[in-house]
């Protein structure tokens, strides 16, 4: 349930409502917009089902929310969330952010070369995995702490921020001081203990969609993070499993407008994992921008054929540079910037 206050509602009337709600054993979440204040009620709503909030002072209207996720719900927070970083970069505003880099950190030379190139082409975040949750236990699992250090050196040299995946509490602790965005991978989207852990921290989280998750499950996973207090969550569509085998996954671009109608959180699209083949990446990246994505995360490798992981879906430097030029045109057409 959300209680929408009149534009001229006083602080006292807001406090009065909150104290009634809290006395009934529920929590409140207050969002102050430019014009109105919205009070979101969190908890077992059967306890207040008949309470006449409508007639209380300052109340404009009361809306019931049927979805199980509240804090991520657009009804709770109608304005889009904009995540701000120290260097002035914002995610969720007019400018579309690009995160780019290799699937995995392999050595200093390649991660530094990738960082310098993608930065010069317009990317603001360096992506790269130091902890790789691979399908086979015998595949390369990442350089772990050494990989984090190499990536950190590269991001500093290039003047970028970095996004990297954590897979459990131990890797989260190791990576925390190096990273700027905590990536929760598709395979961990419903690792609720890990979601609660990152929810207690104060760094933005990129939550990838689970391999076979519905949008509703995904939004509930984001709710786990927000319910612990971390409000800086972005959602990343990375393709889902369908019967189609021509692509690695089926990139669900309709998720972008669907999410825009349901949540205020920024939306990022990953056309690399979404398609699994580098030749399809540019089309889907452009389509994602046209569909309203707030950002892209793209795999780029100096020599994709030699990559230790996901070489088939990685762009080389020239391909990425050309794509960035095209993305500017698409962004302009939908009143955004890159
Ligand atoms: C990745 O981004 O490197 C990755 C492993 O992606 P996903 O979790 O979407 O498979
Ligand atoms: Mn990858």
Image (cartoon, rainbow, N blue to C red):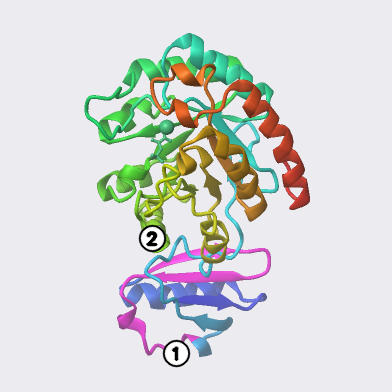
Ligand 1 within 8 Å of the CB at mark 1: no
Query: Residue 28: image x %, image y %?
Result: 42, 67
Which residue is labeled 2 in the image? 214
Residue found 60% across the figure and 74% down from its top:
10
Instruction: Judge the density around disc 2: few (<14), some (14-19), many (≥20) Cα neighbours within 10 Å.
Output: few
Query: Residue 334: image x %, image y %?
Result: 74, 53
Which quadrant would the N terminus be assigned to in this image? bottom left
- Residue 35: say if magenta: yes
Residue 173 versus residue 295: which sits nearer the camera? 295
- Residue 333: say if magenta: no
Picture layout, residue 76 above or below residue 195: below
Which quadrant would the C terminus be assigned to in this image? top right
Residue 173 versus residue 24: which sits nearer the camera? 173
Residue found 49% across the figure and 35% down from its top:
277
Q: Which image quadrant for residue 67?
A: bottom left
Badge 1 element: loop
Q: How many marks?
A: 2
Q: Choose the circle earlier in sequence order: 2 or 1.
A: 1
Please tell me in which quarter of the rendered image ligand 1 is found. Answer: top left
Q: Would residue 139 be found to the left or right of residue 239 on screen?
A: left
Q: Nearer the viewer, mark 2 or mark 1?
A: 2
Query: Residue 312: image x %, image y %?
Result: 46, 29
Q: Which image quadrant for residue 242?
A: bottom left
**Magenta residue span:** 27-53
Which residue is labeled 1 in the image? 52
Say if residue 179 shows up in the picture.
no
Residue found 48% across the figure and 65% down from its top:
73
Query: Residue 318: image x %, image y %?
Result: 65, 22
Considering every residue shown, the one lying at the far front of the view is 246
Instruction: Judge the density around disc 1: few (<14), some (14-19), many (≥20) Cα neighbours within 10 Å.
Output: few
């Amino acid at each position: 349930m959300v209680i929408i206050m009149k534009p001229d509602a006083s602080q006292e009337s807001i406090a009065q409502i909150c104290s009634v709600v809290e006395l009934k054993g529920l929590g409140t979440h207050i969002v102050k917009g430019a014009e109105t204040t919205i009070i979101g009620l969190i908890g077992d709503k059967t306890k207040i089902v008949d309470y006449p909030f409508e007639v209380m002072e300052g109340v404009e209207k009361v809306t019931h929310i049927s979805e199980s996720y509240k804090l991520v719900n657009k009804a709770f927070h109608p304005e889009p969330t904009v995540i701000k970083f120290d260097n002035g970069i914002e995610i969720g505003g007019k400018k579309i952010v690009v995160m780019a880099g290799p699937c995995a950190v392999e050595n200093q030379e390649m991660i530094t070369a990738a960082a310098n190139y993608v930065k010069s082409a317009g990317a603001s975040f360096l992506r790269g995995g130091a902890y790789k949750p691979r399908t086979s236990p015998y595949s390369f699992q990442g350089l772990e702490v050494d990989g984090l250090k190499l990536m950190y050196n590269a991001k500093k040299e290039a003047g970028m921020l970095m996004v990297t995946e954590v897979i459990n509490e131990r890797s989260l602790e190791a990576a925390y001081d190096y990273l700027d965005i905590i990536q929760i991978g598709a395979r961990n989207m419903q690792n609720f203990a890990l979601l609660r852990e990152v929810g207690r921290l104060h760094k933005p989280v990129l939550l990838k969609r689970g391999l076979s998750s519905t949008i509703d499950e995904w939004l509930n996973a984001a709710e786990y993070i927000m319910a612990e207090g971390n409000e800086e969550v972005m959602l990343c569509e990375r393709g889902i499993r369908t019967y189609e085998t021509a692509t690695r996954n089926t990139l669900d671009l309709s998720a972008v407008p669907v999410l825009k109608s349901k949540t205020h959180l920024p939306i990022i699209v990953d056309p690399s994992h979404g398609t699994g083949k580098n030749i399809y990446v540019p089309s889907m990246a452009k389509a994602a921008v046209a569909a309203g994505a707030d950002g892209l995360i793209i795999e780029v490798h100096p020599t994709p054929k030699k990559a230790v992981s996901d070489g088939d879906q990685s762009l080389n430097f020239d391909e990425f540079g050309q794509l960035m030029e095209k993305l500017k045109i698409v962004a302009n057409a939908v009143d955004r910037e890159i």
